[in-house]
Amino acid sequence: MSWFEKLMPSRIRTDAGHKRAVPEGLWAKCPGCSAILYRAEMERNLDVCPKCHYHNRISARRRIETFLDPEPQEEIAANLESVDPLKFKDSKKYKERLTQAQKGSGEKDALVAMRGQLKGMDIMVASFEFSFMGGSMGSVVGERFVRAVNMALERHTPLVCFSASGGARMQESLFSLMQMAKTSAALERLQKRGLPFISVMTDPTMGGVSASLAMLGDINVAEPNALIGFAGPRVIEQTVREKLPEGFQRSEFLLEHGAIDMIIDRRDMRDRISDLISILMSKPRA
Amino acid sequence: MDLNFLEFEQPIAELEAKIEELRLVGSDNEINIQDEITRLETKCQSLTESIFSNLKPWDISQLSRHPQRPYVLDYIDRIFDEFHELHGDRAFADDHAIVGGMARLEGRPVMVIGHQKGRDTKDKLHRNFGMPRPEGYRKALRLMELAERFKLPIMTFIDTPGAYPGVGAEERGQSEAIARNLKVMSGLRTPIICTVIGEGGSGGALAIGVGDRILMLEYSTYSVISPEGCASILWKSAEKAPLAAEAMGITSDRLKELGLIDEIVAEPLGGAHRDIETMAKNLKHALLEGIDNITSMAIDKLLDTRYQRLMQYGQFSGD
């Protein structure tokens, strides 16, 4: 107890333990501008700070929910699960990490694929779950992505992918590396058939995911201020032994260097992508 | 300690030094020490055999980047009848970490592309330690598309720690360069044979590694991240690299078992660097066999087989 509290008469003094608790998570602090924001308002704003437009990371399902029309929606290859082909174990078993990630995220693996509609237009969507082992790409992520491509080929629809990933999943080693080739090969077929692939890179899109499917969009899009690149900033810093420039590997940097076509604010995503696709598919504007 | 030998090779190095010493003595001395030399040579042989029959993945990882390990230009000299190196990506620069050009294999025209490391310090810097920048991958792509136009089979040789993690490489689109190669190679209308001759380091290796037949030299490695990199992330210490090498399954026998590569090319006793001529002969033989197999296939069938193989990568449950 501090000297000041000791001075106070006991009926004014309040016990720390009996403080009326503020419900957890009613308010959130913006990581961008430190403003205290009412969570419900943030959610209405698609988790973009209304003051500084900082784009918070969102889950794969919420991403799809905010992007597609509410109906119809049908999940693609929902029951695929990782099997640990290498019996991988570091300080923890890969199997345990998977179970933990499944519990934490409510997803079976780091990619959700969905068949649905965007303003009435048939479309396939793939969306990375970053909270599932850093959105890392292993066998299941690769397979689900390819199934989404195949469904797009079958039904003659475009494909949109929202990536958020640290790269390939180390615990599946070369199997993970080969997913880069697998997903890229599938996209080659999609693009040869003249079906649009729009790649939306969100924070962060790095390593093996950025060096395969994410950079292969007919149109490459990024959300504002997303970290996008091949090597992580720390690895580069250790290699070149100098401080990296401000804004290095951020969306605006990529736009400046010609790696992406445009940056789209999350709140405009539905409208803008629908416009892009309808032009590529020679359909009237929705 | 001889820096040209790895730690587990040191007993061999010591014996060899002794033999060499005896030879020098023998040349200016009439005493017949040939018997002793022969005895030591036999001993050296069996010592090497016993060390090499019991290599751990971490030992192999070190062998794959042995300072004396032959690089692609060493093989090109010995395997191909002609080699005309082609330079540059036509947009930015010529990346010396990747070499490529037209060649003949027993008279047959082919396109050859490979990562190239340097031998001494100056050469190492010139080759950027075999770590390509985007212009290297774009040069490779240009040569592959050239090969496709003129119906030359492509032979790639993989030997890199990985794509270069630098500021300029990121500015010029390292990710995009790698991704594009993967995509284009999956559909190139010409046969492709890829051989891992040393270090198969992640996306930087795969970027010239999509093909119809994937070979690995016996003591080469192929993995998604270096053992050191994996260890420092998952074990929080690069010193656990031997554990990571074990866990990731990076050796040729393990990857063959897992169905991720097609064929292992045997190395001479003690590794490729102990007898480059034999190694080159083995590799040439494997390439000739491989090219016979795939060029006999109609191109559409070949492409379909390549595609199906790519689609089969991965293990999971459920449907």
Image (spheres, helix red, strand yellow):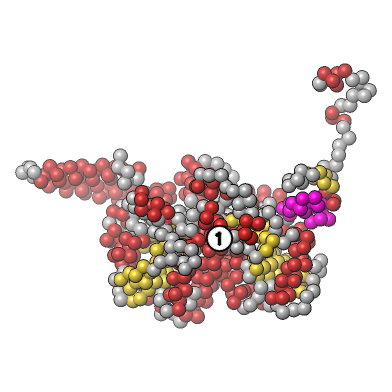
Q: Judge whether residue A53 is colored magenta.
A: yes
**Outermost right residue:** A11
> Quadrant of residue A8 in the image?
top right
Q: Numbered disc 1: what chain? A: B
Reading the image, the residue beneath label 1 is B173
Q: In the image, residue B102 lies at what x, y percent?
A: 37, 72
Using the rendered image of the protein, determine whether residue B233 is visible from the camera's viewpoint. no
Depicted A192 relative to depicted B2: above or below: below
Depicted B193 relative to depicted A194: above or below: above
Q: In the image, residue A5 lies at what x, y percent?
A: 85, 21
The structure residue drawn at horizontal position 20% and vertical position 48%, both measured from the top left corner, is B41
Q: Is residue A36 left or right of residue A131?
A: right
Q: Quadrant of the N terminus of chain A?
A: top right
Q: Which residues are magenta?
A: A42-58
The structure residue drawn at horizontal position 72% and vertical position 61%, both measured from the top left corner, is A264
Depicted B131 relative to depicted B294: above or below: above
Q: Quadrant of the C terminus of chain A?
A: bottom right
The structure residue drawn at horizontal position 77% and vertical position 63%, both measured from the top left corner, is A268
Q: Judge whether residue A138 is colored magenta.
A: no
Q: In the image, residue A74 lies at what x, y percent?
A: 75, 68
Magenta span dominant secondary structure = loop
Q: In the image, residue B81 lies at what x, y percent?
A: 29, 71
Using the rendered image of the protein, determine whether residue B26 is visible from the camera's viewpoint. yes
The structure residue drawn at horizontal position 56% and vertical position 57%, both measured from the top left corner, is B171
Q: Amino acid at mark 1?
A: Gly
Q: Is residue A103 left or right of residue B29?
A: right
Q: Is residue B281 left or right of residue B291?
A: left
Q: How many marks?
A: 1
Q: Is residue A255 left or right of residue A8?
A: left
**Outermost left residue:** B30
Query: Is label 1 in a helix, a strand or a loop?
Result: loop
